[in-house]
Image: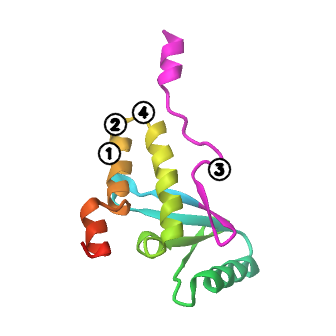
Amino acid sequence: MNLKEIARMEMKFRRGENQIEVAGIKFSVYISEKGRGFELRHKVKSETEIHEIINKLRSVYGEDFMVGIYESGKYTLIRIPAYIAERYDDIKRRVISVLCKKFMRAKNEEKRQYIATVLRRLAPTKGAAAVRNGL
């Protein structure tokens, strides 16, 4: 009986499986509570590292690429919100692949629904593809 319970348990943290690489920098994909959206986060300790990362992101994606900088304990958090990540197809594809893996691993139905909500927001539908292609 104990083995069955252990098998059904969901692992809380798996190192590196929820990360994507954006401009050579690893960002973690976080889903907000209730599946309202997602964001990409990277923790940094020094002020110079913050400026290096922002300059690298802006050199690859342009000067209008926005990031948020927040203090989080002894770390500084660099955050890319969902509405910025959705503009770039390469970032969006990587986020979708991470969320699909997360969806397949989730054993809690509530978490699966949150992930599915975010995936529906990101994944193109047949109707959207037809409008884009002019059909």
Asked if the residue at tag 3 contacts the one at tag 4, i.e. Cβ–Cβ closer than 8 Å, the answer is no
Q: Which residue is mark 2?
A: 109
Asked if the residue at tag 1 contacts the one at tag 2, i.e. Cβ–Cβ closer than 8 Å, the answer is yes
**Kind of residue indicated by mark 1:** Gln
Q: CA distance from mark 1 to mark 3?
A: 23 Å
The span picked out in magenta is 1-27
User: Could you say where residue 113 lies in the image, as x and y percent from the top left?
Assistant: 32, 45
User: Could you say where residue 107 lies in the image, as x and y percent from the top left?
Assistant: 42, 33
Image position of 107 (left or right of 13): left
Q: Please say whether residue 133 is one of the residues in the magenta stretch.
A: no
Q: CA distance from mark 2 to mark 4?
A: 6 Å
Image position of 110 (left or right of 75): left
User: Could you say where residue 19 lies in the image, as x and y percent from the top left?
Assistant: 60, 56
Q: Which residue is mark 1?
A: 113
Asked if the residue at tag 3 contacts the one at tag 2, i.e. Cβ–Cβ closer than 8 Å, the answer is no
Q: Please say whether residue 19 is one of the residues in the magenta stretch.
A: yes
The front one of 101 and 80 is: 101
Q: Residues within 10 Å of mark 4 (few under 14, many from 20)?
A: some
Q: Is residue 69 above or below residue 113?
A: below
Mark 1 falls on what kind of element?
Answer: helix
